[in-house]
Image (tube, coloured by chain):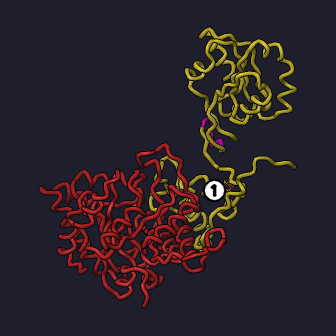
């Protein structure tokens, strides 16, 4: 079979995959990406390059993805709808595909209010679901959003999206996942999991609707490094759900980093047992060096 | 209703300098927003006089955005107007520009900031409701406008930050997608929300002139 990317290949072959996130620098130093990439190289199947995450200006996800390609690593280029209209988005999809990017993750994007340019005008011309559909149609039908035709080469990409089982209204999250699949999502990376029972409940609904057979779901893991980080995730980051039990464990721990790491390993073990989970997506904020060990201790085979 | 708020008085003062000024208010939106009704015009007049700025006259137009009506009403004030080189307008951005059109030789000073098209929910409380997109799709959402009320204008929401019915951007406003979901659920038509809404046709919002 002709796979678009290695990520598609390992998922299709039924392996349990690992993806890891690399945040580009606030500057032009490509070595910042290379250093993180080197650390993680053998620990994941593909690597997300974030697109100005939390609306903070950073080196672009397209450039970051190409830096990874030069290291023979496979990027998952994140694309958000916050900063570009449909013209800019489609143009970057063509450019990225031409440079060899084969995985794209479509997001609506964090609101500019949370970033380092709160005075910016947010674009939000389309949302993540519409963007998925736009790229799918460019790839499969050879047409742009307007209906105009692509003339020389289609973006041969594997498409992903995000899902958040912790957002409200909870009952609508599975329907929304189905919408993403209908729009073109072939793999899903979820919000970081700390509350495993709610996640399982969501997965029960996902399986009940047969969606686990239509899309590859990778569960999100973000190891907690400190009590301060736990508090930020618990109280300030929209859409995350850190239960009190985890918060208490972190607060009581004599070595919070060690505790956070242990929680992450335990969570991965629990996630691996859930039917329909095809992999883990690791975001280690300011703690990338922990990833190789985490992958090993959690028994994730890459 | 066009929602406005009065600019900071010190900023208005700086714009006026020391020259005599004529004051214009508006009987409609700016009156209800308490940014440019008779009461506010008279209050500004007092403050200006206290700051030794001569006020040659004042009027509350009905409403300021009505060019023909303005011409008619302002005829009575030609003397007062001739005594000022500056006109301070306490109306929305539209009203201010209509005055500018009428008096190209004078300096028009904007006395308000125009915020949005919205509803008066109760006295002194306003909510943004419409972005004037040119092609109303309220019927697709049972009367809720996600284009306007979702800060990310999501047509296939909610985003992952919706929490307890509140918006992630501002916990003082409802997540409009939560509202939509709850209403569709109550009406037993959640299946409608599983259809993908296509990107909006923003060319419809580009009309600069309309003639009936
Ligand atoms: S759909 Fe368009 S016209 Fe209708 S309320 Fe929303 S912004 Fe206004
Ligand atoms: S929380 Fe609701 S209203 Fe706020 S940005 Fe998300 S979907 Fe839009």
Q: Which quadrant holds residue B92?
A: top right
Q: Residues within 10 Å of mark 1 (few under 14, many from 20)?
A: many
Left or right of A14 on screen, residue B158: right
Quadrant occupied by the C terminus of chain A: bottom left
Residue A23's x, y, as percent?
33, 59
Of all chains in the rendering, the one displayed in red is A
**In the rendered picture of this protein, how many numbered marks are placed on residues?**
1
Left or right of B105 on screen, residue B174: left
Task: Give the letter of the chain under mark 1.
Answer: B
Q: Tell which residue pokes out farthest to the bottom in this image.
A: A1
Question: Which secondary structure class fits the magenta region best?
Answer: strand
Q: Which quadrant holds residue B40?
A: top right
Chain B tint in image: yellow
Residue A204's x, y, as percent?
40, 79
Question: Would you say the beta carbon of the disc 1 residue lies within 8 angstroms of ligand 1?
Answer: yes
Residue B130's x, y, as percent?
66, 50
Residue A161's x, y, as percent?
45, 70
Does the magenta portion include B207? no
Going 31% across and 60% down the picture, which residue do you hit? A242
Camera-side residue of B68 and A104: A104
Q: What residue did someone put label 1 on? A: B145
Quadrant occupied by the N terminus of chain A: bottom left
Residue A195 shows up from this direction: no
Q: Which quadrant holds residue B87?
A: top right
Going 59% across and 28% down the picture, which residue do you hit? B7
Left or right of A58 on screen, residue B176: right
B33 in relation to B47, above or below = below
Q: Which residues are magenta?
A: B119-124
Going 43% across and 75% down the picture, which residue do you hit? A102
Camera-side residue of A226 and B184: A226
Left or right of A85 on screen, residue A76: left
């Amino acid at each position: 079979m002709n796979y678009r990317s290695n990520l598609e290949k390992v998922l299709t072959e039924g392996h349990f995959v690992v993806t890891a996130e690399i945040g580009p620098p606030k500057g032009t130093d490509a070595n910042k990406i290379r250093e993180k990439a080197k650390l993680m190289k053998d620990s994941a199947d593909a690597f997300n390059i974030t697109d100005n995450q939390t609306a903070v200006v950073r080196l672009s996800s397209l450039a970051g993805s190409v830096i990874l390609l030069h290291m023979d690593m496979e990027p998952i280029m994140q694309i958000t709808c916050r900063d570009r209209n449909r013209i800019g988005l489609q143009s970057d999809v063509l450019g990225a595909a031409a440079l060899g990017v084969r995985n794209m993750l479509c997001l609506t994007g964090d609101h500019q209010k949370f970033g380092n340019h709160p005075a910016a005008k947010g674009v939000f011309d389309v949302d993540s679901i519409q963007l998925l559909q736009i790229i799918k149609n460019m790839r499969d039908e050879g047409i742009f959003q307007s209906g105009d035709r692509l003339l020389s080469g289609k973006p041969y990409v594997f498409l992903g999206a995000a899902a958040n089982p912790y957002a409200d209204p909870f009952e609508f999250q599975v329907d929304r996942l189905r919408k993403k699949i209908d729009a073109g999502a072939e793999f899903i990376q979820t919000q970081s999991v700390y509350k495993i029972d709610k996640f399982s409940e969501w997965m029960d609904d996902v399986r009940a609707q047969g969606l686990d057979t239509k899309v590859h779901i990778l569960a999100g893991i973000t190891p907690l490094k400190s009590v301060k980080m736990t508090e930020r995730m618990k109280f300030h980051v929209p859409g995350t759900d850190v239960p009190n039990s985890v918060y208490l464990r972190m607060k009581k721990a004599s070595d919070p980093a060690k505790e956070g790491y242990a929680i992450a390993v335990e969570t991965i073990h629990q996630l691996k047992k859930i039917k329909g989970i095809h992999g883990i997506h690791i975001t280690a904020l300011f703690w990338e060096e922990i990833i190789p060990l985490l992958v090993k201790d959690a028994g994730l085979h890459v | 209703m066009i929602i406005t708020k009065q600019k900071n008085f010190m900023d208005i003062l700086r714009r006026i300098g020391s020259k005599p000024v004529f004051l214009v208010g508006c009987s409609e939106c700016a009156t209800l927003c308490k940014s440019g009704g008779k009461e506010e015009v008279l209050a500004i007049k007092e403050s200006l006089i206290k700051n030794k700025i001569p006020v040659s006259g004042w009027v509350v137009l009905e409403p300021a955005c009505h060019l023909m009506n303005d011409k008619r009403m302002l005829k009575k004030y030609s003397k007062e107007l001739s005594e000022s080189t500056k006109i301070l307008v306490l109306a929305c951005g539209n009203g201010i520009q209509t005055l500018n059109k009428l008096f190209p030789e004078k300096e028009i000073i904007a006395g308000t900031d125009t915020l949005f098209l919205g509803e008066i929910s109760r006295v002194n409380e306003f909510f943004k409701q419409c972005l004037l997109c040119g092609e109303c799709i309220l019927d697709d959402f049972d009367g809720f406008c996600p284009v306007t009320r979702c800060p990310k204008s999501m047509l296939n929401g909610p985003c992952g930050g919706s929490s307890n019915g509140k918006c992630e951007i501002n916990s003082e406003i409802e997540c409009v997608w939560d509202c939509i979901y709850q209403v569709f659920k109550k009406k037993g038509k959640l299946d409608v929300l599983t259809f993908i809404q296509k990107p909006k046709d923003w060319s419809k919002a580009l009309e600069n002139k309309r003639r009936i």
